[in-house]
Image (spheres, coloured by chain):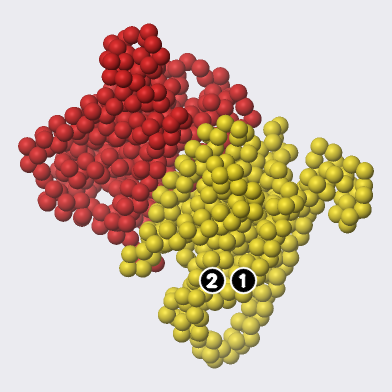
Amino acid sequence: MTGVVASAPGLGRRVATGRRRRALRRRGIAAALAALVLVLFAVSLMVGDTFYTPSEVLRTVLGQTVPGASFTVGELRLPRASMGALAGLAFGAAGVAFQTMLRNPLAAPDVIGISSGASAAAVVSIVLLGFDEAATSLVAIVAALLTAALIYLLAYRDGVAGTRLILIGIGVSAMLESVVSYVLLHAATWDLQTAMRWLTGSLNGATWDQLLPLALAVLVLGLVLLSREHDLGLLQLGDESAAGLGVRVERTRIVVIVAAVLLIAFATSAAGPIAFVAFLSGPIAARLVGGGGGLMMPSALVGAALVLGADLIGQFAFGNRYPVGVVTGVLGAPYLVYLLVRTNRAGGSL
Amino acid sequence: MTTAVGRRSGADAASARRPVPVRVTWLVVAVLALALVAAASVAFGVRAVTWSDVVAGVTGSSDTLAEAAVLKRVPRTVLAMLVGVALGLAGAVMQGVTRNPLADPGILGVTTGASLAVVTGFAFFGLAAPTTVIWVAIAGAAASAVLVYAIGSLGRGGATPLKLALAGAATSAAFSSLISAVLLPRVDALTDFRFWQIGGVGGAAFPRIAQVLPFLVVGAAICVLTARGLNSLALGDDVAAGLGEHVTRTRVLAALGAILLCGAATAVAGPIGFVGLAVPHLCRLLVGVDHRWLLPFSAVVGAVLLTAADVLGRLVARPAEVDVGIVTAILGAPIFIWIVRRQKVRAL
């Protein structure tokens, strides 16, 4: 195709210039997003009941002892902000992986019930079985994989239709969410704050112990997803075209599904199912960056910025402190409605 | 997708036109089943009681603990049956009005809307009078029904089942977040919180039932009166108009009846999902697609299912109770999935 276009005089050069300009723009926006995440991260460390200056925060982060700040920043705010950033990265990357693969912005893991699978398993494991954090993560991971497999199998009938998958996901997640509600509302020792973590997602009570597995998961699985991004883009052309271009279709699909589900499971078992982040990050990143290239990195950064920003809003914008999931839920749902309206207007494939 | 559904239900109509004796038989069976679950609902519960206790309790005696327990189960049973009637009927009417097999007050976000309206009223406007609560719930149900239908019917193809279900899921998610945001700082509202997130009939009392009863009666009457109109609507708007049906008027009237029913049911029992979805499908299998039979039958079967779900919720987790909203979600979601699997949808 490029040959046909380039045969017109001068066109080839213009296409090349345009491509270069777009690539430059994408890199610029990705850098701006990374800077935004850093700023939000820094603000999360500085702001709170006591304000600490950037230099105090920096010294604490570098390991020096600063009176007051060492505990508040080092033990409370740093784990909280790190968990927010990591969970956001995980949700953002996993969300866009699903959306790209299923070619539908609505096919995000939190809409199709995978997050609620991890959430339900985590609640049962903590409240009913009394497992510790490591075991809970494991249970959540297994449950998320099983939920994904179940939804896929239920949606399978002469191939998996996107619409059927989404509707079945809605049904499965309704069921799993009622399990979460039941367990939480009937556990007498369970307080509402902790319950909210599993109902909508919250960064309250983040500790260093929870962070290590999440950080490792984000690093390893994030790299796996990034390495498959190119093939994933080719899959959008359809299975046969992708195979013709040298993509191992089934293997790519399985690797991407497993990596994305694992990311969701790790993030959910640490921070709860933070509402709508996985769903929102991809479309927002696509709007910022524009089409025609990989969205994995921008979407992960948008996810981190969303979680950190929403947590700041939830903590300090109102008289009461709200968990981050309530904020992303309230912000995210209108966007979902807007997306539906826009897709419907455009006569999109719903 | 809509046309496929319409065509299918048309074909069903031919094959599923049940003779009157069959329908009457099924109706008698349903009423008997209702009597049976009502008896079970009074007899079984967290506290095991003897039959003599049941008889004494139902006749008003509360001398022993067992008899008092039975006495408390009577309004609960009545409420479960009323809410079941309301939701079964509302579901059947909604599926008829939207010509959508996935329509359900819970899935379309109508009950969550009612819930949010009531919670907002409690928190910010000092809402207390029970009759006002019912009006507010109905207003919330109506507003969210209009919103979801508007979002779902934009664009090409009108209100397809998928678009409506997604619009409903999105709206419900938004409303649930808002409900959490309103209730979270109010720890004193903890018991209410439970009630408005997951429906249940545990707190039933006769005075409250009496307040909500007129709304249910009016709503049910409107719904049953539109049965003939819904039959015409099932043929498609154009054919219905050709048959002399006032399409818009019928649709608005039927929707109004369904909203009255859901709003009032939510005001007294909280949001309960999937009853309105599952019941009409079951009933269509038994008595066919004629709404004049389907609506009353859905009402009776709705009462049977909700009461049975409540009894089940009391028995499975003794000594704790599982709220009926949770039982219906766990039993109803597989039915939802089954219906989705039967639909023809575009391949990926």
Q: How far across and down, in percent of the image, does residue B79 sit?
A: 34, 23
Give the amino acid type for the residue marked by disc 1 in the picture: Val
Give the structural element (helix, strand or loop) at label 1: helix
Instruction: Give whichever of A30, B188 is nearer the camera.
Output: B188
User: Compared to A150, does B260 lie above or below?
Assistant: above
Residue A223 in view in this figure: yes
Q: Is residue A300 left or right of residue A50?
A: left
Residue A286 rendering spot, x and y as whole percentages: 59, 63
Q: Residues within 10 Å of mark 1 (few under 14, many from 20)?
A: some
Colour of chain B, in one word, is red
Residue denoted by label 2: A255
Q: Chain of mark 2?
A: A
Mark 1 — residue? A224
The reply to whether dot 1 and dot 2 touch (C-beta < 8 Å) is: yes
At a point 68% along the width and 59% down the height, the residue shown is A213
B336 with respect to A98 (left or right):
left
Q: What amino acid type is highlighted by mark number 2?
A: Val
Under circle 2, the secondary element is helix
The quarter of the rendered structure image containing the N terminus of chain B is bottom left
| Quadrant in the picture for residue A86 | bottom right
Q: Residue at x 43, y 37 (%)?
A: B326
User: Which colour represents chain A?
Assistant: yellow
Rendered view: A191 above or below A305:
above
Which of the labelled discs sits on residue B27, or is there none?
none
Q: Residue at x 67, y 74 (%)?
A: A23
User: Numbered disc 1: what chain?
Assistant: A
Q: Earlier in the sequence, mark 1 or mark 2?
A: 1
Residue A111 seen in the figure: no
